[in-house]
Amino acid sequence: MKKRGEDRLYWYAEPQLVYVTYSDGSRPDWEVGLNSGLMYQLALGKGWFATAAIGTGPHFVTVETPLQARGFIFSDNFEAGLIAPLGPGLQLHLRSRFRHISNAGLKNPNKGIDIFFALAGIVWRLGA
């Protein structure tokens, strides 16, 4: 069983680049930005961790919708997940994330856009 002292707190920086194409052939849209935040990993034992994270960061979007103006926005993220060991230096990461983007009232419309993500990934730690 892992000791409680093996819980971890990380600061992270996560660049984001999104390219969107449309089935109707209209011009594509872009989103570019950088999120920064804190992630806490609670040791559950034998290499398992429960995770929680919160972050925010500036972005620029080219899309304009009835809910959100084009241009500078903020992206706020809340996340919960699980890390499972797969072998020496190998982990499975499963996460669910809620993200809200809006421009803090700098330009109308500013009702924001809410997005839910399901994320899965394999992490291979070199030298482990």
Image (cartoon, rainbow, N blue to C red):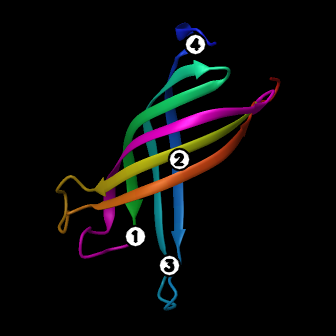
Q: Secondary structure at mark 4?
A: helix
Main secondary structure of the magenta stretch = strand
* Mark earlier in primary sequence (4, 3): 4
Which amino acid type is shown beneath numbered disc 3?
Pro
x and y, in percent, of residue 3 in the image = 58, 8
x and y, in percent, of residue 87 in the image = 80, 31
From the viewer's perspective, is residue 124 above or below residue 42? below
Q: What segment carries the magenta color?
A: 62-89
- For disc 3, the marked residue is 28
* Mark earlier in primary sequence (1, 4): 4
- For disc 4, the marked residue is 6
Which amino acid type is shown beneath numbered disc 2?
Pro
Q: CA distance from mark 2 to mark 1?
A: 17 Å
Q: CA distance from mark 1 to mark 3?
A: 9 Å
Image quarter for residue 36?
top left
Q: Is 80 one of the magenta-colored residues? A: yes
x and y, in percent, of residue 71 in the image = 33, 64
Q: Which mark is residue 1?
A: none
Q: Secondary structure at mark 3?
A: loop
Q: Secondary structure at mark 2?
A: strand
* Mark earlier in primary sequence (2, 1): 2
